[in-house]
């Protein structure tokens, strides 16, 4: 039962951490979700840390190292934890077990690029991305990252060709808007007319501040601020997320939310009448809230209201 709990925890974390990375890791950053109670979804089950869950998965894979799905689960979890060396090892094992799989090659290339910490997809990652694209020209993440290799080589015409095709494929509003910005950057380099970028109606406006009692926790530091909405009833996965690198001087700040921040194209903020709004300051960058994170009290808000919502980060996650 404990082993099943570990896999359930990992699965929930990956559900929250991966949707947007399906599109553009480099463009939008690794998406994070902010549920402070994920590890306690079932009160009958003991709380388990992500590290404990990963350790159990690793033990299981020692017994059955040829489990491709298990290796991919381990690789993605290590990637979400920014343990890129371990992620690459697991991805390489998965690639050995299932060669010529476009998804595996794409994610392996991304992990290698981040492990190398050189900010480039040229070299070994490029080889895997070219193969991934050849195997599946509809693999959206492969198209995006493969296009990055041509952008790095200043082959803007090839980049434009790949990313224009990608733009026509995707339905995610936020991804489409940001890709339009990238396309216009390239088109301007090629002296081509710009495309019209999508415009979204603002559905939420809010001011986010940090309480006086917590300011010392952020003094002299940088951290990640996550502002999120989620359903009042239903899935714990956020509907929208804004992610910002912040320091104390950035507070208070005004933010606005629209369908541009949707995590999934089939769950649009504009489709809800009421949502829960909250904020979290993370010092770890992990997908789930960690002990010591600074959190706000969550508020139920009505969409489309003209009132400016006040969100105060005033508690420490225990």
Image: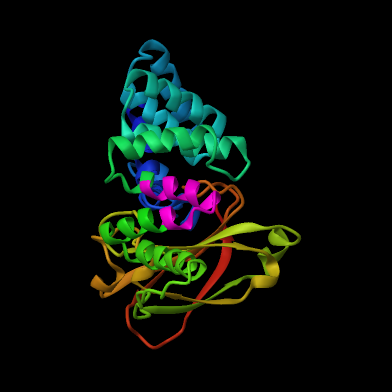
Residue sticking out furthest to the top: 63
* Side (left or right) of 24 relative to 1: right
Residue 83 in picture, x, y percent from top left = 55, 34
* Side (left or right) of 218 relative to 193: right
Residue 155 in picture, x, y percent from top left = 49, 53
Residue 211 in view here: yes
**Residue depicted at 42% across the width and 65% down the height:** 183
* Side (left or right) of 75 relative to 270: right
Instruction: Report the label total.
Output: 0
Viewer-side residue, 232 vs 99 = 99
Viewer-side residue, 242 vs 148 = 148
- On whether residue 240 falls in the magenta region, the answer is no
- On whether residue 156 falls in the magenta region, the answer is yes
Residue 93 in picture, x, y percent from top left = 42, 20
Q: From this view, report whether residue 281 is shown above or below residue 40.
A: below
Q: Quadrant of residue 90?
A: top left
**Residue depicted at 54% across the width and 40% down the height:** 122
Q: From this view, report whether residue 93 is shown above or below residue 137.
A: above
Dominant secondary structure of the magenta stretch?
helix
Q: Quadrant of residue 59?
A: top left
**Residue depicted at 33% across the width and 48% down the height:** 140
The span picked out in magenta is: 143-159
Residue 315 in picture, x, y percent from top left = 57, 61
């Amino acid at each position: 039962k404990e082993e099943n709990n570990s896999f359930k925890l990992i699965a929930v974390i990956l559900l929250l951490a991966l949707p947007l990375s399906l599109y553009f890791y480099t463009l939008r950053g690794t998406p994070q979700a902010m549920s402070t109670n994920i590890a306690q979804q079932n009160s009958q089950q003991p709380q388990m840390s992500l590290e404990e869950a990963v350790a159990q998965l690793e033990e299981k894979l020692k017994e059955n190292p040829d489990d491709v799905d298990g290796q991919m689960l381990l690789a993605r979890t290590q990637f979400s934890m920014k343990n890129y060396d371990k992620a690459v090892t697991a991805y390489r094992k998965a690639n050995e077990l299932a060669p010529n799989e476009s998804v595996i090659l794409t994610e392996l290339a991304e992990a290698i690029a981040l492990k190398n910490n050189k900010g480039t997809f040229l070299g070994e990652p490029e080889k895997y991305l070219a193969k991934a694209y050849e195997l599946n020209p509809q693999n959206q993440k492969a198209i995006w990252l493969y296009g990055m290799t041509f952008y790095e080589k200043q082959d803007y015409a090839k980049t434009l060709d790949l990313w224009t095709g990608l733009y026509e494929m995707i339905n995610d509003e936020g991804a489409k808007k940001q890709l339009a910005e990238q396309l216009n950057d390239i088109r301007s380099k090629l002296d081509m007319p710009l495309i019209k970028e999508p415009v979204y109606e603002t559905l939420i406006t809010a001011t986010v501040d940090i309480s006086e009692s917590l300011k010392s926790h952020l003094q002299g530091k940088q951290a990640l601020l996550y502002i999120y909405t989620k359903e009042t009833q239903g899935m714990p996965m956020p509907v929208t997320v804004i992610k910002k690198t912040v320091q104390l001087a950035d507070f208070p700040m005004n933010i606005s939310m629209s369908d541009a921040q949707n995590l999934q194209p089939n769950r649009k903020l504009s489709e809800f009448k009421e949502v829960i709004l909250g904020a979290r300051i993370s010092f770890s960058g992990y997908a789930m809230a960690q002990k010591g994170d600074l959190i706000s009290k969550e508020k139920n808000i009505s969409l489309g209201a003209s009132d400016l919502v006040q969100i105060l980060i005033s508690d420490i996650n225990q």
